[in-house]
Image: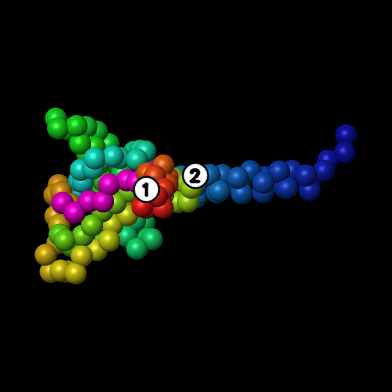
Amino acid sequence: MKKNYFESILGLFTLVLAISFLLKFIDVNKENDNTYDLRAKFLKAGGVVIGNDVKMRGVKIGVIKNVSLDEDFFAVVDFGVYEDVSVPRDSTVKIASDGILGNKYLSITPGANTKDLLSLNEEIKKVEDFESIEDQVSKIIFLATQ
């Protein structure tokens, strides 16, 4: 039986490469524990789910941790923001979409007062509710008929 060292070395190299890609994938997708929790209440949550991104000016700054209803039937979205990112108290939060069929995410527009910052478990009061495509089309039709 003929020994072929080249195939054995190539198989070993492929195995090491696959394991390194797996470890990198796990490292990139693990949740950053260095976060502080914030909250926002919406009339319509628009399909955001646990694990969706929180972005500020298009840069990921956190992850949605929980979506629930409160006693007044508002959609309560709890999310974590990385500790190295400060969110001004007068910031505005809205639910945005990555295109027509894209993933939903929370978009935070920072306020002008950079001295007064939100801290752990505070609620962002300025919210813009989610507008679906149907809502936007109905507004356009209503404006066109006037």
Q: Quadrant of residue 42?
A: top left
Q: Which mark is residue 101?
A: 2
* Residue at 27%, 36% in the rendered image: 67
Label 1 sits on a secondary structure element that is helix
Q: Is residue 111 magenta?
A: no
Q: Furthest-front residue in view?
A: 146
Identify the residue at the far left of this view: 116
Side of 92 where 1 appears, left or right: right
From the viewer's perspective, is 9 left or right of 31?
right
Which amino acid, mark 2? Answer: Leu
- Of callouts 2 and 1, the N-terminal one: 2
- Please tell me whether the stretch drawn in magenta is mainly helix, strand or loop: loop
Q: Which residue lies under the disc numbered 1?
A: 142
Question: Looking at the image, which residue is at 14% across and 55% down?
Answer: 119
> Residue 133's x, y, as percent?
42, 45
- Could you tell me which residue is drawn at 24 percent across and 37 percent down? 75
Q: How is the image coloured?
A: rainbow
Q: Magenta span covers which residues?
A: 125-132
Where is residue 77 drawn, in percent x and y? 25, 41
